[in-house]
Amino acid sequence: MQSVFQYFTNNWSYILELTFQHFQLVATAVVIAILIGVPLGIYLTTNKALAEAVLQICAIIMTIPSIALFGLMIPLLSVINQGIGFLPALIALILYSQLPIIRNTYVAINNVNPDMRDAAIGIGMTTWQRLRQVEIPIALPVIMAGVRTAVVLSIGIGAIAAFIGAGGLGVLIDQGISRSNRDMVIAGAIGVSLLSIIADSLLGLVQKKLSPKGA
Amino acid sequence: MIQFSNVTKIYNGNVKAVDDVNFTVQKGNISVFLGPSGCGKTTLLRMVNRLVPITDGTISINGTDTSSLNEIELRRKIGYVIQSNGLFPNMNIEENVCIVPKLLGWDRKKQRDRFNYLMDLVGLAPDEYRNRYPHELSGGQQQRVGIVRAMAADPPVMLMDEPFGALDPIIRTHIQNEFLQIQKEVQKTILFVSHDIDEAIKMGDRVAIFKDGKLMQYDSPAELLANPKNNFVRQFVGSDRAIKSLSLYTVADLLDQTKLKPVKNKLTTPRVSVDTNLREVLSTLFNGSESELLVEDHNKQVIGSLTIADVQNYLQSNSQTA
Ligand SMILES: Nc1ncnc2c1ncn2[C@@H]1O[C@H](COP(=O)(O)OP(=O)(O)OP(=O)(O)O)[C@@H](O)[C@H]1O
Ligand SMILES: [Mg+2]
C-alpha cells in the first residue's frame, strides 16, 4: 500500500493528465449520447412498437463485451484511418450510454401523469411547449438518473479503451500489466474508482437540484 | 352562446359515446351535464375544445363552427378545469395560474395583477400562495387554484369536469356557493359536468340529462323537477324531487305567496334569513325542537314566524303551477 502511495506522489502530474484524458473521453461521449438518446427516448413515447425494438437493440449492445466491440470497430474505422485511438473509444462509449439514457427518458416521459398531459393540451400548449414546460421538467430527475448510470458505466469501460490507444487512466492498468508493475495497476484502478465516485456524487447533487420542488 | 348540432362521437368505430345531441347554451349561463357514469358527459365536454375529435355534427361558439378554428387558439380562449385539477407539480402556484396569460404574451405586471385579483376572488391570499407548490395546498385549495387557472386569461367559455368531485361535502358546498357568487360577477358561459343531481340543481341555469350518449331532457332545474320527460329522468332526479325543488326557492319567494304569522316566543326559536333556501328551512324545522322558525330580514329584524305547513302549502301551489 505504501508503494502505491509512493507511486501516486511520484507521478501525480502524469496521473492527472491521464485523468483529464479519461474525463474528456467520457464527457464527450455522454454529451453526444444525451443529444441522441433524450430526443430519441421522447420520440419513442409516440411509437410503442418502435420503442420496444430500439430498447431491445440497446440491450443487446450492452451485452457485447467492450473488448469485442473495440475489436469490431478496428476494421470498420480503419477505412478512414481511425481504427484505433479516440474515435472508436468514443463511439463505443456513446453506444453503451444509449440504453440507460433512452430507457430512462422513455420511461420517465411515459410515466408523466396523463392528467398533466391532458391539462397541458387542454390549456392550449403546443406539443413543444408541453414537452418543454411540463413533461421534461417532471421527467428530468429520472432522465438524470439515466445519465448518471451512463457516466459511471462509461468511466469503467473507458479504462479498457486504453488498450486501443485512447488514453485515459486505463493506460496505467495496461502498462502496469505489461511491465508487471503492480503499483501502477492499482493506482490506475484507484483512479478510475475515484473518478466514478466523484462524478456520481456530483451528478447526484445535480439530479437533486433538478427535481421539481413540488414533487 | 354554444350550439350543439347533431353532435355524435363514435370511439374506435363501435362505441357510440355521444349520440346525435342537439341543444344550445345561452351566453352567461351555466349548463350542467348530468347522467350516470359512462353516459358521455366528459366526451361531450372535451369535444368543445377539440380534445376529442367530433365524429359527426358541429359545435359552434357564438356562431363560429369550432372545427374551422385553430385548435391551439381555440383552447386558449376556453378555460378548462379537469377533475383532478391538473396543476403542474414543477411550477409554483403563480406560474401555474399564469400559464395561459404567459402563452398569450401578457406582460409581467398584467399577469401579476390578474393573479392577485383572482386569488382574492376565491379567498386565497395571493402573497401567501404565490410561491408555494401544488402539493403544499389542501385538496380544496388546489381545486380553487385549478379554477383560478382556468379563468386566468378571462376566457368567455369555461369547461369544468366534475370540478368539485374530490371534495368533502362541507368544503364542496362552500366552494359551490363561492363559485356561484363569482359567476354573478364574471358571467361566463360554463359547461359543468356532474353526476350529482343536487349539485346540478344548485349550479345549473339549465341541466342536460344524458343516458347512453343520448340527451334525455334539457331544461331549467325547476322544470326538470316538476315535469320529468320520461321514466329515466324521473328516476334519476329521484322520488324526493319535490323536496329537492325546495332548494331552488328562498324564504323571500315564499313571502310572495304567504303571510308570516306573528311572533310568539322570540327567545328560543331558531332564526333564518329571508335568503335561506326552503330545503334548508325544512331541515332546520325537522332538526329543531320547535315547530316554527323566526324569519329575519336583511337588517336582522325579525319579521314573523314560519311553520312546516307554510312550506308544504308553498310546495303544493308551486307544483300545480309548474
Ligand atoms: N378514449 C376512449 N376510447 C374508447 N372509448 C372511450 C374513450 N373515452 C371514453 N370512452 C367510452 O365512451 C363512453 C362515455 O365515456 P365518458 O368518459 O364520456 O363518460 P362520462 O359520462 O364522463 O362518465 P363518468 O361519469 O364516469 O366520468 C364510455 O362508454 C367510455 O367507455
Ligand atoms: Mg367523465
Image (cartoon, coloured by chain):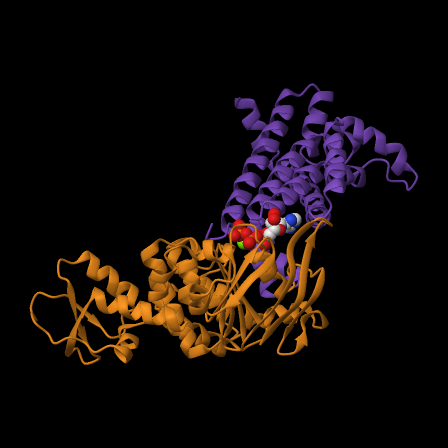
Chain colours: A purple, B orange
Q: Measured along the vertical axis of the image, is residue B314 above or below residue A6?
A: below
Q: Quadrant of residue B10?
A: bottom right
How many labels sit on residues? 0
Q: Quadrant of residue A77?
A: top right
Q: Nearer the viewer, residue B198 or A176?
A: B198
| Quadrant of the frame with the C terminus of chain B | bottom left
Q: Is residue A50 visible?
A: yes
* Residue located 42% across and 53% down the image: B166
Q: Is residue A206 left or right of residue A188?
A: left
Residue A5 rendering spot, x and y as whole percentages = 54, 27
* Residue located 56% across and 27% down the image: A6
Q: Is residue A157 left or right of residue B217?
A: right
Q: Nearer the viewer, residue A18 or A43?
A: A43
Q: Is residue B164 left or right of residue B41?
A: left
Q: Residue furthest top?
A: A180
* Residue located 22% across and 79% down the image: B298
Q: Measured along the vertical axis of the image, is residue A110 above or below residue B196?
A: above
| Quadrant of the frame with the N terminus of chain B | bottom right
> Which quadrant of the frame does ligand 2 lie within?
bottom right
Q: Is residue B87 visible?
A: no
Residue B210 rendering spot, x and y as whole percentages = 55, 58
Residue A116 rendering spot, x and y as whole percentages = 55, 54
Q: Nearer the viewer, residue B95 or A23?
A: B95
Residue B270 rendering spot, x and y as whole percentages = 14, 65
Q: Is residue A14 left or right of residue B92?
A: right
Q: Residue furthest right?
A: A79
Q: Residue furthest front?
A: B320
* Residue located 63% across and 29% down the image: A188
